Image (cartoon, rainbow, N blue to C red):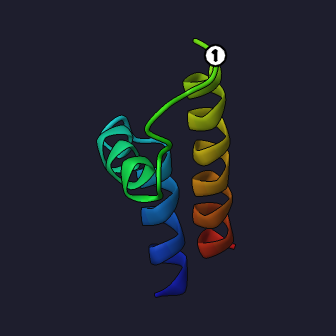
């Protein structure tokens, strides 16, 4: 049963539908209202996505 859960989580992580869920999580994790530079949002979002990915990978392992 554990293998089935790992396979399901692995499929979800690589699925395009996860992007919508990830976007909702990013905004719920305290996204800054104001960015100092035009690229600050992109950097913040990339960092938050890496953190989300690390959390999901830890669940799969």
Query: Residue 4 appears in which quarter of the rendering?
Result: bottom left
Residue beneath label 1, please? Answer: 37
Task: Residue 55 in the image: state x and y as whole percent.
Answer: 62, 65
Task: Residue 42 in the image: state x and y as whole percent.
Answer: 58, 23
* Residue displayed at 60% across by 47% down: 48
Q: Compared with residue 45, is residue 5 higher up or lower down, i.e. above or below?
A: below
* Residue displayed at 61% across by 70% down: 60
Please tell me how crowded label 1 is: few (under 14), some (14-19), or many (20+) other residues with Cα within 10 Å.
few
Classify the position of the C terminus by image quarter. bottom right
Q: How many marks?
A: 1
Q: Residue furthest bottom?
A: 1
In the picture, measured across the screen, residue 2 lies left or right of residue 20, that is: right
Q: Residue furthest top?
A: 38
* Residue displayed at 58% across by 12% down: 38
User: For this rendering, which residue is in front, 2 or 34?
Assistant: 34
Q: Compared with residue 35, is residue 33 higher up or lower down, i.e. above or below?
A: below
* Residue displayed at 32% across by 49% down: 24
Q: Compared with residue 43, is residue 58 higher up or lower down, i.e. above or below?
A: below
User: For this rendering, which residue is in front, 53 or 32?
Assistant: 32
Secondary structure at badge 1 equals loop
User: For this rendering, which residue is in front, 21 or 5?
Assistant: 21
Task: Residue 58 in the image: state x and y as whole percent.
Answer: 68, 71
């Amino acid at each position: 049963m554990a293998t089935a859960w790992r396979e399901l989580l692995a499929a979800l992580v690589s699925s395009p539908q996860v992007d919508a869920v990830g976007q909702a999580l990013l905004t719920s994790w305290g996204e800054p209202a104001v960015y100092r530079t035009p690229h600050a949002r992109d950097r913040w979002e990339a960092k938050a996505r890496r953190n989300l990915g690390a959390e999901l990978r830890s669940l799969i392992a």
